[in-house]
Image (cartoon, grey):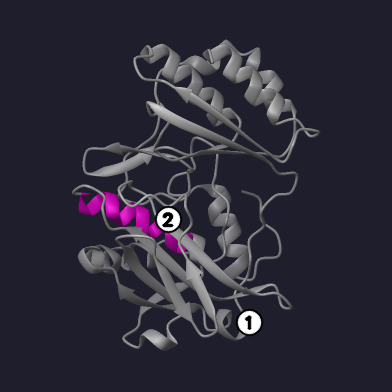
């Protein structure tokens, strides 16, 4: 399938009347850098979550895709597309909203963390300190008792599961152990629509990640654990940008103007949502 046909097929698949899920396969091995960059930016415009062999496209409407086909400026410099990619296109018409924690937990203004991250243990402790400097209205506190912790951080070296009471949390098939990312899964009380526990899984087989890269990943996952499911798409998104690129000792937004972290930067949308969840703000303007 040519790049142009793939782009057209993706655009059609993300229309409102398209099937809920479609799959596309495309081999970029040997493709010119311009082709990779153009496809990468096109996928970004379709609100893509990237992984080494799985790219999930989540659409909330039809306009972006149609406009993208007519906008050559999206094929500017920057970005990486993996050689072998599988595209799972899922149409979504609803926005993921922040989810609060149970009131008895949220009222304390803190979440307790049990650290069982193995080789990432020191980085988890560093990330807790960095998180607490971000003025979210909630603090993370290290806990020595695993059973009573609100968040448990786990280094995964294979398909992982964690038992919490009667619930079993499992890593999804999208969680790749050798890629620099994490996966956070929250348990939610269906009647109260409130979180009562979160598990953070970290990649146990990533190749020699630096302390800075680990810190960025962990802080990002802690924000998910606090009740923020979405990523930001704007150039000033900082820590919650949905796709990061490696940059020296740290990570940065995968955009031409991305800036290396740490130090951790927080975008206005994330700060707004966190303060609404944890500082009592009824509304805010990011």
Residue 56 drawn at (x, y percent): 55, 40
Residue 189 drawn at (x, y percent): 66, 77
Residue 123 drawn at (x, y percent): 25, 62
Location of the N terminus (image quadrant) = top right
| Along the line of sight, the residue nearer the viewer: 165 or 76 | 165
**In the displayed structure, does residue 227 sit left or right of residue 123?**
right
Q: Residue at x 58, y 51 (%)?
A: 230
Instruction: Name the chief secondary structure element in magenta.
Output: helix
Q: Residue at x 34, y 15 (%)?
A: 30
Neighbour class for label 2 at 10 Å: few (<14), some, many (≥20)? many
Residue range of the region highlighted in magenta in the rendering? 209-223
Q: How far, Cα to Cα, is label 2 from label 1?
A: 23 Å
Is-magenta flag for residue 189? no
- Specify the quadrant of the image occupied by residue 80: top left
| Along the line of sight, the residue nearer the viewer: 250 or 283 | 250
**In the displayed structure, does residue 135 sit left or right of residue 275?**
left
Is-magenta flag for residue 220? yes
| Secondary structure of the residue carrying numbered label 2 | helix
Could you tell which of marks 2 and 1 lies nearer the N-terminus? 1
Q: Residue at x 20, y 64 (%)?
A: 119
Q: Is 266 located above or below residue 75 in the figure?
A: below
The numbered disc on residue 164 is none
| Along the line of sight, the residue nearer the viewer: 135 or 229 | 229
Neighbour class for label 1 at 10 Å: few (<14), some, many (≥20)? few
According to the image, label 1 marks what residue? 103
**In the displayed structure, does residue 242 sit left or right of residue 269?**
left
Give the number of marks.
Answer: 2
The numbered disc on residue 220 is 2
Q: Is 251 located above or below residue 106 in the figure?
A: above
């Amino acid at each position: 399938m040519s790049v142009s046909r793939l782009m057209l097929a993706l655009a059609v698949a993300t229309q409102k009347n398209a099937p809920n899920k479609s799959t596309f396969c495309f081999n970029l091995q040997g493709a010119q850098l311009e082709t990779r960059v153009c496809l990468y930016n096109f996928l970004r415009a379709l609100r893509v979550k990237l992984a080494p062999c799985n790219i999930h496209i989540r659409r909330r409407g039809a306009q972006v895709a149609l406009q993208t086909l007519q906008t050559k400026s999206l094929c500017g410099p920057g970005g990486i597309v993996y050689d072998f990619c599988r595209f799972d296109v899922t149409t979504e018409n609803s926005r993921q909203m922040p989810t609060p924690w149970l009131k008895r937990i949220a009222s304390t203004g803190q979440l307790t963390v049990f650290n069982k991250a193995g080789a990432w243990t020191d980085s988890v402790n560093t990330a807790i300190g960095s998180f607490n400097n971000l003025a979210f209205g909630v603090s993370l506190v290290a806990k020595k008792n695993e059973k009573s912790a609100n968040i448990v951080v786990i280094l995964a070296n294979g398909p992982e599961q964690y038992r919490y009471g009667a619930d079993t949390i499992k890593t999804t098939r999208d969680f790749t152990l050798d890629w620099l990312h994490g996966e956070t899964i929250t348990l939610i009380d269906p009647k109260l629509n409130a979180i009562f526990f979160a598990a953070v899984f970290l990649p146990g087989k990533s190749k020699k990640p630096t302390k800075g890269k680990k810190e960025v990943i962990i802080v990002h996952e802690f924000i998910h654990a606090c009740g923020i499911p979405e990523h930001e798409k704007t150039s000033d998104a900082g820590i919650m940008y949905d796709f990061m690129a490696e940059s020296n000792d740290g990570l940065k937004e995968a955009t031409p103007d991305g800036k290396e972290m740490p130090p951790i930067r927080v975008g206005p949308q994330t700060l707004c949502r966190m303060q609404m969840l944890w500082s009592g703000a009824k509304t805010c303007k990011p």
